[in-house]
DNA sequence: TAATAGCGCTTGTAATTACATGTATTTATT
DNA sequence: AATAAATACATGTAATTACAAGCGCTATTA
């Protein structure tokens, strides 16, 4: 589907990340030295270092001058605070997604606590609501709004147990490049009590997220409610 | 105090960051091109690009191929979710720090939800509690524990309105290189109701943070309670 | 006049080379 | 045998060069 040819540092990064996730390199082990990796992948040190920098940034390894690259492991927990969407952060094994409101086109009135432009408003938005369950426990309830600009046939995709990020990437060549999020704590509303099966005194984490993409000036938004009682929200920095 | 000589890409990064914060480059403006910056700072493109990469990562600019580096502004809000400690994230103008419990040496029993080694336990820890106020509103209440290993005269420093990160850097050459954090929502305990002057139904954000440092195998820990009612916790990714 | 092809700018990727600096082991010295 | 110096090897920083690819303006052309 995606025929883009990836840069070499991305290939190296993804390969090493996979190897770490699969336990080919154990936690505490040293990765091969940068020069060895150069030989293995047939690239030069700057390319290898770019891949390793990203692994450091994503928390898979740490580096020590004079020592090497030490495998730290796969970032654990519900890493919604870092890039990648919920699915890639968790590993899709335990996560199921239930669609509460299928993607539908609506007027674009607001994007939670973020400002939107007149241009965005004019085109309306694609609106959807999902419930995410980890091992059958409902953990996330999220509302997503995407400006309805140049996304043909979007509402006809099936989102059940599929990653929104992947659909955007594979069908629309849209890569999420970054974003920002605001975090608050609230008491469970009636709707949320119902979805999460919790009492009204249950404190809930609310994340308002803005996702920037590789298409200039195209961002989409989501509001995520988390029952962090059983599963911790984890992030590295 | 700190006589380390900084690499050039760090100098460029810090200079540009300062210029953006001070409004010398306005939001939406283009930075000078990479080649221009090379000439200005007397370095080569890889060096400039390293500095720009960090600015992108920290949310100060975004880059567009064929266009340039667009100034995004200074990351707003209480950016405790990214690196740098509370002070640097906010700009120290609005933030005051009140010491509730001055640093004292205690047995090291636990580090909140993180595991600690026998080696750490053996040496005990430095314990302190602080209340942070933004414009005189109490917003953070935090407990910090630091393994008492090779930190001479630590408890004799004055921490009132001073940054812990700066003291660690300047007096002990300890740089925070990263870390992880767990996020939960809780109801205000009596102590927190008192500190934050809120009712018992007020939901509070609890952050358990582990900070890794440039000294191998040396981390310290803090538990931060945030009243995110008035000031949002913001992070970029 | 309107579409387009070209050009000059930008950033993105990548190889190559050189030296600095921290770590750990080995070797030589006392 | 204990200490210190030498060493090999790791990552860190940096300059240099080359080409690819995206953006926007201009001038050419239909």
Image (cartoon, coloured by chain):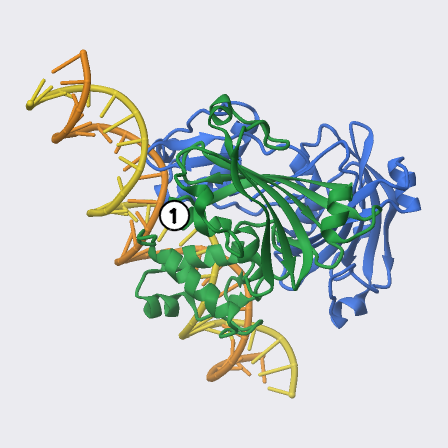
Chain colours: A blue, B green, C yellow, D orange
Rendered location of residue C28, percent (x, y): 8, 22
Residue A28, horizontal then vertical, whole percent: 47, 25
Lateral position of residue B31 relative to residue B234, left or right: left
Q: Is residue A30 visible?
A: yes
Residue B4, compared with residue B103, is above or below; it is: below
Vertical relation: D20 (above or below) B188: below
Task: Count residues near mark 1 (Cα–Cα under 10 Å), then give few for <14, some for 14-19, many for 20+.
Answer: some
In the image, B37 versus B233, the foreground residue is B233
Q: Residue at x 57, y 28 (%)?
A: A21
Q: Which residue is mark 1?
A: B171
Q: Is residue A58 visible?
A: no
Give the x, y percent position of residue A82: 62, 44
Subunit ID for the residue under disc 1: B
Q: Residue at x 48, y 64 (%)?
A: B17
Residue at 68 percent across and 34 percent down: it is A90
Label 1 residue SS? helix
Give the tally of numbered discs. 1
- State which quarter of the image contains the C terminus of chain A: top right
Q: For residue B136, which quarter of the picture?
A: bottom right
Residue visible at 46% across and 27% down in the picture: B123
Residue B225: quarter of image: top right
Q: Seen in the image, is B202 located left or right of residue B68? A: right
């Amino acid at each position: 589907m995606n025929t883009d040819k990836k840069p070499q540092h991305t290939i190296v990064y993804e390969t090493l990340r996979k190897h770490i996730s699969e336990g080919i390199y154990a936690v505490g082990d040293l990765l091969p030295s940068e020069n060895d990796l150069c030989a293995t992948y047939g690239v030069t040190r700057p390319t290898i270092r770019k891949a390793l920098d990203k692994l450091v940034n994503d928390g898979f390894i740490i580096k020590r001058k004079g020592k090497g690259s030490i495998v730290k492991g796969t970032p654990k927990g519900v890493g919604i605070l870092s890039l990648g969407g919920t699915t890639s952060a968790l590993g899709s094994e335990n996560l199921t997604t239930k669609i509460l409101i299928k993607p539908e086109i609506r007027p674009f009135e607001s994007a939670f606590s973020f400002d939107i432009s007149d241009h965005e408003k004019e085109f309306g938005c694609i609106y959807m609501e999902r419930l995410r369950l980890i091992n059958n426990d409902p953990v996330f309830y999220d509302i997503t709004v995407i400006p309805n600009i140049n996304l043909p046939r979007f509402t006809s995709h099936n989102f059940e147990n599929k990653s929104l990020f992947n659909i955007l990437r594979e069908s629309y060549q849209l890569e999420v490049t970054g974003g920002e999020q605001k975090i608050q704590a609230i008491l469970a509303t009636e709707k949320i009590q119902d979805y999460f099966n919790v009492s009204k005194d249950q404190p809930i984490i609310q994340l308002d997220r803005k996702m920037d993409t590789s298409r200039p000036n195209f961002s989409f938004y989501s509001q995520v409610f988390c029952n962090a009682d059983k599963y911790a929200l984890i992030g590295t920095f």
